Image (spheres, rainbow, N blue to C red):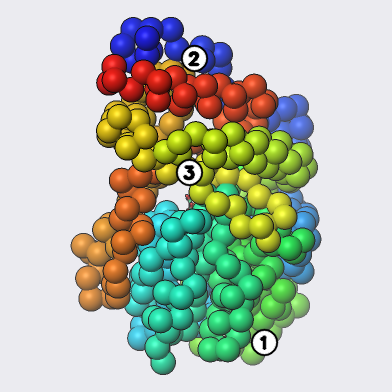
Amino acid sequence: MLAIKGGEPVRKKEWPQWPVFDEREIKILEEVVKSRSWGGGLSDSGPWEAKFEEAFAKRHGCRYGITVTSGTTALFVSLLAAGIGPGDEVIAPALTFWATGSAVLMTGATLVIVDVDPDTYCMDVNEVERNITEKTKAIIPVYNYGTSPDMDALVKLAEEHNLVLIEDCARAHGFEWRGKPVGSLGDMGCFSFQEGKFMTAGEGGIIITNNELYAERCFSIKNCGRIRRGRDISEIGIDYWWNWFNFRMTQFQAAILLVQLERLDEQLKIRQENSEYLSKRLQEIDGITPIKVRKELTKHQPWPYAFKYDPKSFKGVPLHRFIEALRAEGIPASGLDHPPLNMTLTARYPSRIKRTKYPVAERAMRETVTLPQWVFLGTKEDMDDIVEAILKIQKHADEL
Ligand SMILES: Cc1ncc(COP(=O)(O)O)c(C=O)c1O
C-alpha cells in the first residue's frame, strides 16, 4: 500500500544534512573574531575576502573576483559595470529565480524574457537570436537544473552582435563547459552563496571576470564609490562612479567561504555521479524524463534536479498528487522551483518587460518534479530509494 494511504514508506532514513561544516569553519571564524577585522575592506578587499576572491576566481578560470552581499547584487553590480541602464534591453530566460530579472529592472533597463529549450529548460538560443534588436546590450544565460544553454552558440552570438554576456552561475559553482570553468566563458560570471547553494556563508555573492576594467568598476560600485588603493578614477570612467552602494561582504562570510571552497570539487564529484546514475535509472521508467545535461558540461551538479512527469503513464494521477505521494514515501520532492519570470515580474514593471511566447516554460510548470541538491550528497542506494518510490507509485497508481 502507498505510504500516503497508510502503508510503509520506501524510505525512513534521514537524507544528508545541509549546510555541511566541520571544525575548520569554527576555527576560522574564531580567527576572524580575534583579528577584529570584521567588516569588508574599504580601500581594498579585507584579509579573508582578498584570499577568497583570488582563490574562487582562480578555481573558475578568472583573474579577478569581487565579493558582494548576494547573487542578486552580483548581477546588479555587473550590469551597472557593463554600463547597462534605461533604454537598454537585456535578454534573460523565463525559467530562473526572479533575481535574474529583477537585477535587470533595478538598473532601469528593459527585461526581455525568452522561452527555454524543452530538453534542458535553459535559455533557447534561437529565441535569444530572434529577440535581439538595436537596443539589446546584454544576455544573461542561467545554468539551471544542473545543465546549461548552448554556451558555444551564445558566446558566438554575443560576439557577433557586440553584446555583454553575463553568466548567472548562482546555481553552478564548479561547473565546466568542455573543461573550461563556467563564469569565465562570457564577460562576467555571478555566483550566489545563499544558504541552499553549493557553497554558502548563509548569504553572499561574487562576480568573477578576466576584464580588469569591469573588475575595478565592480569594486567601486559595491564599495560606495571608493576606488581601489593605487587606482585612479580616470581608469574606471567617471560615468560609472556615481553608482554608489554598500554591497560589501563581511570577513566572517569570506572566511567560511574559503573553507567551503575546499569541499567544492569533492562534493561536486559525488553529486555528479549520483545524479548521472539517477538519470540513467529514471530513463527506464515509462512516463519519467530527466532534464538533459548537455554533453559539453564536463563538470556539473543538480540545482535542483528536475524530471518531467507524464500522468498518462501513472493512470492519470495529476502532478501535485504524484508529488504528495512521493513525499509520503520519504522522498523530498517538489514541483517546479519558481513560476516563469513572465508570470511573476510583469505586474510591477509592465512597461519595462518585453514578453514573447512561453509554451515550454509554461508547460514546465505542469510537468516538472524537482529534488534538492543535498539529496545527491548521499549514496547510490539513496538514488535507488527514489527510483523504488516512483515505481511503487506507478504500480499502485489506482490507490490515488
Ligand atoms: C539563478 C539564480 N540567480 C540569482 C539568484 C540570486 O541569488 P541570491 O539569493 O544570493 O540573491 C539565485 C538565488 O536563488 C538564483 O537561483
Look at the image and tell me whether residue 69 can be seen: no
Residue assigned mark 3: 289
Mark 3 / mark 2, whichever is N-terminal: 2
Q: Nearer the viewer, mark 3 or mark 2?
A: 3
Q: Which residue is at a point 21% across and 62% down the rendered structure image? A: 347
Q: Which residue is at a point 31% across and 46% down the rendered structure image? A: 366
Circles 3 and 1, Cβ within 8 Å, touching? The answer is no
Mark 2 is surrounded, within 10 Å at the Cα level, by few (under 14), some (14 to 19) or many (20 or more) other residues, namely many
Residue assigned mark 2: 10
The x and y percentages for residue 117 are 45, 62
The x and y percentages for residue 184 are 69, 68
- CA gap between label 3 and label 2 equals 21 Å
Amino acid bearing label 1: Glu
Q: Front-most of 106 and 397?
A: 397
Q: Quadrant of the C terminus?
A: top left
Q: Regarding mark 3 in the picture, which secondary structure is present there?
A: strand
Q: Is residue 26 above or below residue 233?
A: above
